[in-house]
Image: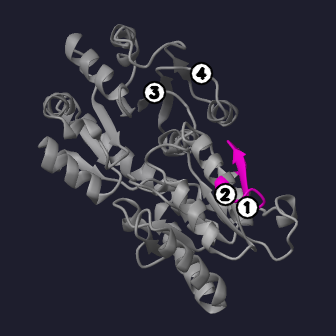
Amino acid sequence: MRVLHIINSLGVAGAEKLLVDALPRYKNFGVEASLLCLNGKRTIFYDTLSQNFDGKIMDLGKGSLYNPLHIFRLKKLLKNFDVVHVHLFPSLYWVAIAKFLFRLKVPLLFTEHSTNNRRIDHLIFRMIDRLIYRFYNGVFAITPAVKLKLVEQLNYDTNRCHVVYNGIDVEAFKNAIPYPKSEFFEDPNAVLLIQTSRFQREKDQKTVIKALALLPNRFKLLLVGDGELKAECVELVSRLNLKERVLFLGVRADIPNLIKTADVVVQSSNWEGFGLTAVEGMAAGKPVVASNVNGLNAIVESYGLLFNARDEQMLASCVEQLMTDPEFYRETAKKCAQRADHFGLDKMLAAQIEVYKTVLIHDI
């Protein structure tokens, strides 16, 4: 079976990280996987995949993702594969339109990576989405909440919408070697919090920074990632006099080691489709404290701790509860580690490949 994954680019974000980790494993299932990026800009994820993946990595140049000429460039490529698996907007649109215009027979699948499809909130775009999604033979919803939104708001056929949770390389986080804390802070009693997320609207590093200001000085924070809102977070750290307690580490390739070094993993978000970094923290054997929003709460509830979104006092209280009660800390970390075992990459791939096979049978 020849499967082509299509995504906007390999920028540093959750859906892209998922593909970087998953693509090299397809050969273990007897599947020949390839990747096409609308924009082939070289990134740390692109370099990582190039080193670990022996399949084809293609791109349509370095131009705008929104160039409609991509539709015509896709025509020849789509014909060469048994199944095409698409990720993110606008790849979602261009591939569907190409299939329609050129009467292509290749089955299409799409992964809905977020509960926050802003197009659904506008009548015209919602109507367009309803049409576009009909060109897909199936959709993977990464949580039941995502499926519910697709079925209710886009009238998508519930029988063609498959809940398949995202997966991670559990062993990579479980067996990661931590760094000495002294590499980051001189305080020998430092308690390290970490959030690994891009600095964009769906994430909420500001609440973590505000919570840190409510905690004793021995609590420190590592913020990993980059993005358009990073400057605002840097300014907030300065305004709250937290410069000596917060490190902005930028984009890193050693996420498992960084998470393993921390004491508590925080995932503060305004919304999420799934919460991949929360699962990574669990796999590293760390207690996870996350915003109580759709996507995250389905993963963390009853295992880690949840706090109300944008409530820094509740977040600080959760962290203090963990760090002042060693037994509670150990029990929470243990439950989180057990939870992570449900989200292995191979489980995700096996479920997706079963859908590929079903779609191919029905398409013959």
For disc 1, the marked residue is 176
- Residue 112: say if magenta: no
Rendering quarter of residue 218: bottom right
**Gap in Å between the C-alphas at discs 4 and 3?**
10 Å
Question: What is the secondary structure assignment of the residue under circle 3?
Answer: loop
For disc 4, the marked residue is 41
Q: Which residues are magenta?
A: 239-254
Q: Amino acid at mark 1?
A: Ala
Name the quadrant of the C terminus. Answer: top left
**Gap in Å between the C-alphas at discs 3 and 2?**
26 Å
Residue 303 visible? The answer is: yes
Mark in front: 1 vs 4:
4
**Gap in Å between the C-alphas at discs 1 and 4?**
29 Å
On the image, the x and y values in percent for residue 276 come to: 50, 55
- Please tell me whether residue 214 is drawn above or below residue 37 in the rendered image: below
- Residue 244: say if magenta: yes
**Gap in Å between the C-alphas at discs 1 and 2?**
6 Å
Assess disc 4: are there few (<14), some (14-19) or many (≥20) residues with their C-alpha within 10 Å of its C-alpha.
some
Residue that appears at 37% across and 59% down: 295
Q: How many marks?
A: 4
For disc 3, the marked residue is 8
Name the quadrant of the N terminus. Answer: top left
Residue that appears at 66% across and 57% down: 172
Q: Are marks 1 and 2 in contact (CB under 8 Å)?
A: yes
Answer with left or right where residue 274 lies relative to residue 304. Answer: left
Answer with left or right where residue 247 lies relative to residue 126. Answer: right
Question: What is the secondary structure assignment of the residue under circle 1?
Answer: loop
- Please tell me whether residue 351 is drawn above or below residue 32 in the rendered image: below
